[in-house]
Image (cartoon, rainbow, N blue to C red):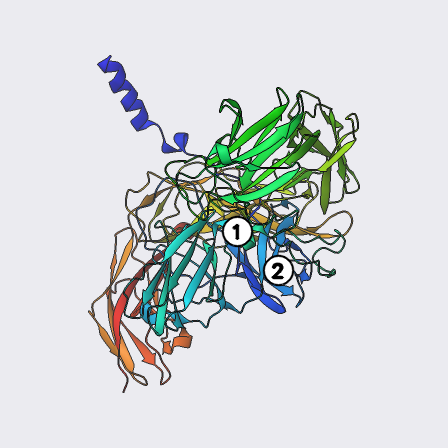
């Protein structure tokens, strides 16, 4: 036995790590965020759209009354973000989303709430995400604001837009309050699908933390405190964990006016413009959201009792709201029913985002339980019972929270509905988008939820299909709760987008039934709570262009020194007559941390099928962190389809660039512990260069940080093959400012045989003195 274990251990030690490596998580395009996540009515908002695996020329569409945006994303942008420290990398999947410029125009009479947006290209489309429309002044953070001294001042009321962009990132904001003011802070992150799990603190100007009341709207906090004195206060925003990134966005409304934290989550979507008008035309503003007292938003709770003997009587049909004001609270209602009469009884959290997890019990007057339903058994937290009365008489409905005896409070609200049962059903889609390749097929699961004794078969129809796309007939039988819709695109179907409606019909029921399917969008938190409904009644279909090329490499071990730029051979297989340019870059999705590795993006000329991609391995990589580097490349191309329409597509490499890293070949060190910089003066930095016997060639030294616009300039210096010490003058202009990091960073480069470039860097601390 021991010999077997030793043999197994030896095999595992000798087996290449790539055998157990995880593949790239996905090759499909995806959106990750939009920043800022909203804007004020009557404004034009510059935004940055975050995405993975999309090419330049990707389409950008937004749906909403009075909201429009350019049809294509603009240029790729590099955000100024608070960097995270380099740590020993982990062998876990990781993404590096890119950001693209765009603008969103919001009409002065655009309805408050949300518009929905998505991206699409010849490779496919993405799910929809929300862009929020507000009425208060908007403030967009700018870095650095990670210390109280750099807190950004805002004037209340205001909606603050920010993001926790790195592990070290903290966001501080400063505002004034008058003694006795009650400040409300509504934090929106999870409810728009953000990666951020926010922690928000309020403090006195001297740093003392204030105690604030907090409740949760879904997973987002809502905070309130009363200002003890007149003066300045700060708000600190951070992430509950150590992570951060461009997709960790948030919106926080700060106001001293009365504020309902659940209003935004309960607001219904306004009627949408037609697909032809989406993203362009502006429709008439709809009526305002329903108010308390209407059928859509019932009046305040009637008087109820915690004792069955004094249960509140309900006349059918009935809707009632209530609250479990404390942990012991339970509400009782009395109803009358005839023998075999079927009733539909449902209870759900109201409005969306409250923490209620209702339980329904139907009892006889003696207290015996006849039926029971719990919100713990359903994903949307709405429990429902279709109950048939066993005899004529009175019956009791008992409501309580799942955590009865442990939790309760004024935020534990619910909506109870009791009506005579009628056959009905709802349809749900697994996703709000689907991609169908030319000449191919794609499937989408559809589920049905039947109530009121509905047993009739449900026929599925799809409206709005583009030319060249069809749906194979589908029906949900009486005993069937799910089916897969098959979308089929012809070979010559035009690559395009379409907005569809999936409709279910039950013509065989006593009264013909018809319902539109709803699908989850990406602007939801872990509990399914969003700003507005968590689902939409549209399905977005993208016809994908057939593949134009494949990208791959040999996936054989190669060796590169840290501190070098190494040329890695990639291969392009051109398909379907494509002979255009292909740009190769580092993949947005990786199966492990890059540890600082960079691809130097290259464009492969038309007709060429191989290319050497320069990969930079920094000398600061962690030694022995990985047995090997596994890198995924991606390539994009812009072309015209058979109809003459411009298309763009992106392909992720089918193979990995596998490289074992070797020790550095050159080391650059600063001999000055510190230099003093004064405007108008010239400083001389002394550096030392060490080389290994494998590399003894000449090199070129240059100042790379700070950039010239900071007032520091230096001419490159040649370092001879036998030279190990070099002096480089740096001129400080009269308008110079202190370098952001307090250092001057130098880089030396030299060429080896085989196309390898050797690079080494060092920094010289600088003390900036005004004359």
Instruction: State the separation of the CA atoms marked 1 and 2.
Output: 15 Å
* 269, 351: nearer the viewer: 351
- Quadrant in the picture for residue 547: top right
Label 1, residues with CA under 10 Å away: few <14, some 14-19, many ≥20 = many
Q: Mark 1 points at which residue?
A: 192
Chain-order first, disc 1 or disc 2: 2
- Quadrant in the picture for residue 422: top right
The disc placed on residue 574 is none
Q: Mark 2 points at which residue?
A: 112
Q: Is residue 445 above or below residue 551?
A: above
Q: In this view, does 235 lie above or below 626?
A: below
Residue furthest out toward the bottom: 771
Q: Is residue 639 above or below residue 134?
A: above
Label 2, residues with CA under 10 Å away: few <14, some 14-19, many ≥20 = many
Residue ID at (36%, 50%): 240
- In this view of the protein, can residue 453 be seen by the observer? yes
Q: Where is residue 71 in the image (x, y as percent from the top left)?
A: 68, 58
* 758, 771: nearer the viewer: 771
Residue ID at (70%, 21%): 478
Disc 1 secondary structure class: helix
Q: Position of residue 10 (x, y in %)?
A: 28, 23
Q: In this view, does 47 lie to the left or right of 590?
A: right
Q: Is residue 698 left or right of residue 501?
A: left
Q: Where is residue 690 in the image (x, y as percent from the top left)?
A: 24, 59
């Amino acid at each position: 036995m021991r010999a077997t274990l030793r043999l197994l251990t030896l095999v595992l030690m000798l087996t290449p790590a790539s055998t157990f490596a995880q593949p790239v998580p996905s090759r499909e395009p995806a959106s990750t965020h939009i920043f800022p996540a909203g804007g004020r009515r009557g404004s034009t908002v510059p935004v940055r759209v975050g995405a993975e695996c999309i090419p330049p020329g990707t389409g950008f569409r937004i749906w909403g009354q009075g909201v429009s945006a350019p049809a294509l994303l603009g240029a790729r942008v590099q955000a100024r973000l608070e960097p995270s420290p380099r740590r020993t990398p982990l062998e876990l999947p990781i993404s590096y989303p890119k950001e693209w410029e765009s603008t969103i125009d919001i009409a002065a009479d655009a309805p408050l709430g949300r518009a929905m947006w998505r991206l699409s290209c010849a490779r496919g489309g993405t799910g929809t995400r929300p862009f929020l429309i507000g009425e208060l002044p908007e403030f967009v953070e700018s870095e650095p604001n990670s210390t109280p001294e750099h807190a950004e001042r805002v004037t209340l009321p205001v909606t603050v837009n920010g993001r926790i962009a790195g592990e070290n990132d903290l966001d501080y904001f400063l505002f004034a309050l008058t003694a006795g003011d009650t400040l409300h802070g509504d934090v929106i992150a999870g409810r728009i699908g953000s990666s951020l799990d926010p922690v928000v603190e309020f403090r006195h100007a001297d740093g003392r933390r204030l105690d604030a009341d907090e409740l949760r709207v879904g997973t987002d906090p809502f905070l309130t405190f009363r200002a003890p004195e007149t003066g300045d206060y700060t708000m600190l925003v951070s992430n509950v964990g150590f992570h951060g990134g461009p997709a960790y966005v948030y919106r926080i409304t700060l106001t001293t006016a009365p504020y309902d934290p659940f209003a935004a989550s309960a607001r219904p979507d306004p009627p949408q413009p037609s697909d032809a008008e989406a993203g362009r035309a502006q429709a008439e503003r709809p009526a305002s959201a329903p108010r308390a007292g209407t059928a859509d938003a019932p009046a305040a709770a009637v008087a109820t009792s915690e004792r069955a003997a004094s249960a509140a009587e309900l006349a059918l049909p009935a809707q009632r709201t209530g609250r479990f004001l404390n942990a012991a609270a339970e509400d009782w209602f009395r109803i009358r029913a005839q023998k075999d009469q079927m009733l539909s009884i449902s209870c759900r959290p109201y409005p969306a985002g409250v923490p209620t997890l209702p339980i329904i019990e139907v009892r006889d007057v003696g207290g015996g339980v006849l039926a029971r339903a719990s919100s713990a058994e359903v994903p949307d937290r709405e429990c429902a019972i279709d109950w048939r009365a066993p005899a004529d008489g009175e019956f009791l409905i008992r409501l309580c929270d799942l955590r009865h005896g442990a939790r309760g409070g004024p935020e534990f609200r619910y909506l109870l509905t009791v009506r005579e049962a009628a056959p009905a059903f709802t349809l749900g889609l697994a996703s709000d988008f689907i991609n169908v390749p030319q000449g191919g097929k794609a499937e989408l699961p559809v589920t049905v939820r039947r109530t009121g004794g509905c047993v009739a078969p449900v026929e599925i129809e799809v409206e709005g299909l583009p030319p060249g796309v069809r749906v194979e007939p589908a029906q949900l039988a009486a005993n069937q709760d799910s089916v897969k819709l098959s979308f089929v695109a012809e070979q010559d179907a035009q690559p395009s987008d379409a907005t569809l409606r999936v409709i279910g019909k039950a013509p065989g029921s006593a009264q013909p039934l018809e319902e539109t399917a709803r699908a989850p969008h990406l602007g939801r938190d872990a509990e399914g709570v969003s700003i507005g409904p968590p689902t939409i009644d549209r399905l977005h279909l993208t016809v994908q262009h057939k593949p134009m090329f494949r990208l791959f490499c040999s996936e054989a071990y190669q060796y590169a020194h840290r501190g070098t730029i190494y040329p890695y051979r990639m291969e392009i297989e051109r398909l379907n007559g494509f002979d255009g340019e292909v740009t190769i870059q580092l993949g947005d999705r990786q199966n492990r941390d890059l540890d600082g590795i960079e691809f130097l993006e290259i464009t492969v000329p038309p007709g060429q099928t191989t290319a050497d991609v320069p990969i930079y391995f920094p000398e600061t990589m962690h030694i022995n962190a990985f047995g090997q580097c596994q890198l995924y490349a991606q390539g994009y191309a812009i072309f015209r389809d058979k109809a003459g329409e411009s298309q763009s597509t992106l392909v992720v490499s089918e193979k990995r660039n596998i490289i074992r890293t070797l020790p550095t070949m050159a080391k650059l060190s600063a001999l000055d512990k510190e230099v003093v910089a004064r405007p108008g003066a010239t400083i001389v930095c002394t550096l030392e260069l060490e080389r290994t016997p494998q590399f003894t060639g000449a090199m070129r030294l240059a100042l790379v940080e700070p950039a010239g616009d900071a007032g520091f300039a230096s001419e490159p210096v040649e370092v001879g093959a036998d030279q190990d010490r070099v002096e480089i003058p740096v001129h400080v202009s009269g308008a110079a400012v202190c370098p952001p990091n307090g250092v001057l960073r130098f880089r030396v480069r030299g060429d080896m045989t085989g196309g390898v470039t050797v690079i080494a860097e060092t920094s010289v601390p600088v003390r900036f003195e005004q004359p």
